[in-house]
């Protein structure tokens, strides 16, 4: 283990148990007065009726800190200040450098995790509203897989229901070949708008659409074939967007609403047998928890509507039962916007009452806010329409191309295109993930593409600059070890590097990716200070080698950390 804070936590926990006979959280944190500080003596002494400084002294005497700390002091009313020795820092950094995982162990108890994310609607183009779920979900997959968990990706696309009667009729009107062409070039929105316009203008078309829905739901072979054509062309379009965005969703990850159709009657029967089903206004409903509507009446989760059809409530219940049962997941993550919080809570509570969701399995809503324009409202085009995701990403790459051409005109065309894509897409992703996901954020190309501040280009450039150090030195990083730490800036960089594992571990639990982004920004800042105060290529012998080792470990940590956020790191920029 190379996580310093965790090592100190273990040693002090053991000392507290020796002294008090109790399990005590030592409350270790970074400090301005030393490298770390333990605050546990004050609350523990108060509970035990002891003087805090006396308890702190006894704990320090019992703690095995000789191989880690060069200084341990008790300050104030009982704070324990801990200064890590240069030898311990060098030893732990060497261990990290020799490990492809940078000294970060895999999860001691791997879980089987289902991540539900992206979830666009078939026959509609992806827009900016799909950005956050897709980016946050992909980061969750990357972090959890890197930690050693078994991750199952589920792209719960909307590809069933009454709109498809209207869409199949439009497909028949324009002809299958023409419809296939329209959809294959990605004009899903145009196809949908044309169908909707006819539906709104013609009662005859509305009736045809309703009859087609009945045929679809009853399994008519021709209707199913045409519906499948719509769905497959939509999937192909979604995959092109995912490739542009650089996320890990693939063809095998699609599992749409229709996959659960044959399970819906069984869901209804099981809920009735369990005594959870109640009739309300002609519909079959469940009433989980204590949810109320605005009038103060119990809020239902509708399983079967009054017309006999099944709604998305039934589909969501079938989905959670399938994931817990057939997929045998013990952690479910729903990466869905915050407005769906109550609905997902009701689905989870119903699953608990039905006995499908039982400890240790958990179901978590990974909610997020909205993407706003400069006016503070939902991001839209000047005409007031939703911003197409492809258009937004294409503009990001185009803007990055101009920035890179100005910053490094010596890059050839192929290299410039690759760097521009990494910078443009990375900027969009990082601006999202660097924000507390629960909050809204303003989409601002100028800010996110800046090479200054907490942005992806700043971090990408920090790593690229390290790569240039090795090119100028004409050496490789193989076999380098940290052996000497002589300056405060070196020690601060060392402490930052050794905190990587703890941050990743916490993010795997909370899925608060802004904390990983903040750590990487802090690491890049620590490296900048180190580089300004500690000559690397200007030093000689063992000191030069040791500082090159610090450079390499920083570059590798930035690369791994950004990759966990789904962001590429070019060697040249």
Image (cartoon, rainbow, N blue to C red):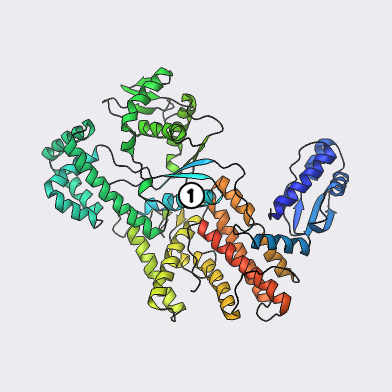
Q: Is residue 210 visible?
A: yes
Where does residue 64 sit, x and y in percent of width and height?
A: 82, 50
Q: Quadrant of residue 48?
A: top right
Q: Residues within 10 Å of mark 1 (few under 14, many from 20)?
A: many
**Viewer-side residue, 214 vs 97:** 97
- Total numbered circles: 1
Where does residue 181 sit, x and y in percent of width and height?
A: 19, 55
**Viewer-side residue, 478 vs 336:** 478
**Viewer-side residue, 537 vs 338:** 537
Q: Give the vertical position of 439 relative to 524 (above or below).
A: above
Q: Is residue 126 visible?
A: no
Tell me the element at label 1: helix
Relative horizontal placement of residue 220, taking residue 35 as reference (left or right): left
Residue drawn 73% across the image and 61% down it = 91
Q: Give the vertical position of 291 relative to 26 (above or below).
A: above
Residue drawn 83% across the image and 38% down it = 20
Where does residue 55 sit, x and y in percent of width and height?
A: 86, 44
Q: Which residue is mark 1?
A: 141
Residue drawn 40% across the image and 22% down it = 271
Q: Give the vertical position of 319 relative to 106 (above or below).
A: above
Relative horizontal placement of residue 162, taking residue 13 as reference (left or right): left
Q: Give the vertical position of 521 relative to 415 (above or below).
A: above
| Residue that sits furthest to the front in the current view | 479
Q: Quadrant of residue 204?
A: top left
Relative horizontal placement of residue 5, taking residue 185 as reference (left or right): right
Q: Quadrant of residue 477?
A: bottom right
Where does residue 7 sit, x and y in percent of width and height?
A: 73, 51
């Amino acid at each position: 283990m190379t996580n310093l804070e965790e090592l100190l936590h273990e040693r002090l926990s053991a000392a507290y148990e020796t002294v008090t006979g109790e399990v005590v959280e030592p409350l270790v944190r970074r400090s301005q007065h030393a490298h770390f500080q333990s605050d546990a003596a004050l609350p523990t002494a108060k509970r035990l009726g002891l003087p805090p400084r006396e308890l702190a002294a006894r704990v320090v005497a019992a703690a095995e800190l000789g191989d880690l700390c060069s200084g341990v002091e008790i300050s104030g009313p009982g704070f324990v200040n801990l200064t890590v020795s240069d030898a311990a820092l060098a030893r732990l950094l060497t261990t990290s450098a020799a490990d492809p995982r940078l000294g970060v162990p895999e999860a001691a108890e791997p879980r089987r995790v289902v991540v539900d994310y992206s979830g666009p609607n078939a026959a509609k183009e992806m827009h900016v509203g799909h950005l956050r779920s897709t980016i946050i979900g992909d980061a969750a997959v990357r972090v959890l897989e890197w930690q050693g968990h078994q991750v199952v990706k589920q792209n719960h696309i909307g590809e069933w229901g009454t709109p498809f009667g209207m869409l199949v009729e439009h497909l028949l009107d324009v002809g299958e070949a023409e419809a296939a062409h329209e959809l294959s070039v990605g004009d899903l929105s145009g196809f949908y708008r044309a169908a909707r316009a006819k539906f709104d203008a013609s009662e005859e078309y509305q009736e045809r659409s309703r009859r087609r829905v009945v045929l679809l739901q009853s399994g008519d072979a021709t209707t199913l074939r045409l519906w499948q054509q719509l769905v497959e062309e939509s999937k192909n379009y979604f995959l092109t967007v995912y490739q542009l965005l650089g996320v890990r969703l693939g063809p095998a990850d699609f599992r749409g609403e229709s996959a659960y159709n044959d399970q819906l009657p069984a869901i209804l029967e099981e809920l009735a047998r369990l005594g959870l089903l109640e009739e309300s206004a002609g519909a079959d409903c469940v009433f989980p928890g204590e949810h109320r509507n605005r009038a103060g009446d119990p809020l239902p989760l509708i399983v079967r509507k009054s017309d006999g059809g099944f709604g998305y409530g039934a589909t969501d219940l079938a989905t959670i039962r399938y994931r817990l049962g057939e997929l045998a997941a013990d952690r479910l993550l729903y990466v869905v916007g915050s407005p769906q919080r109550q609905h997902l809570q009701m689905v989870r509570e119903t699953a608990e009452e039905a006995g499908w969701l039982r400890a240790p399995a958990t179901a978590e809503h990974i909610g997020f806010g909205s993407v706003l324009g400069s006016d503070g409202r939902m991001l839209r085009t000047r005409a007031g329409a939703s911003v197409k995701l492809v258009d937004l990403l294409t503009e990001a790459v185009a803007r990055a191309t101009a920035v890179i051409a100005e910053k490094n005109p010596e890059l050839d065309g192929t290299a410039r295109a690759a760097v521009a894509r990494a910078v443009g897409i990375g900027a969009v992703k990082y601006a999202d993930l660097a924000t507390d996901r629960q909050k809204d954020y303003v989409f601002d190309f100028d800010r996110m593409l800046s090479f200054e501040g907490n942005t992806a280009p700043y971090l990408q450039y920090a790593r690229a600059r390290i790569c240039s150090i090795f090119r100028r030195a004409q050496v490789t990083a193989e076999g380098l070890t940290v052996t000497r730490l002589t300056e405060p800036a070196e020690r601060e960089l060392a402490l930052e590097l050794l905190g990587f594992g703890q941050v990743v571990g916490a993010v795997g639990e909370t899925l608060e990716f802004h904390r990983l982004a903040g750590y990487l920004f802090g690491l890049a800042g620590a490296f900048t200070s180190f580089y300004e105060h500690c000559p690397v290529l200007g030093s000689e012998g063992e000191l030069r080698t040791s500082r090159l080792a610090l450079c390499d470990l920083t570059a590798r940590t930035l690369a791994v950390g950004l990759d966990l956020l789904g962001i590429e790191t070019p060697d040249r920029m």
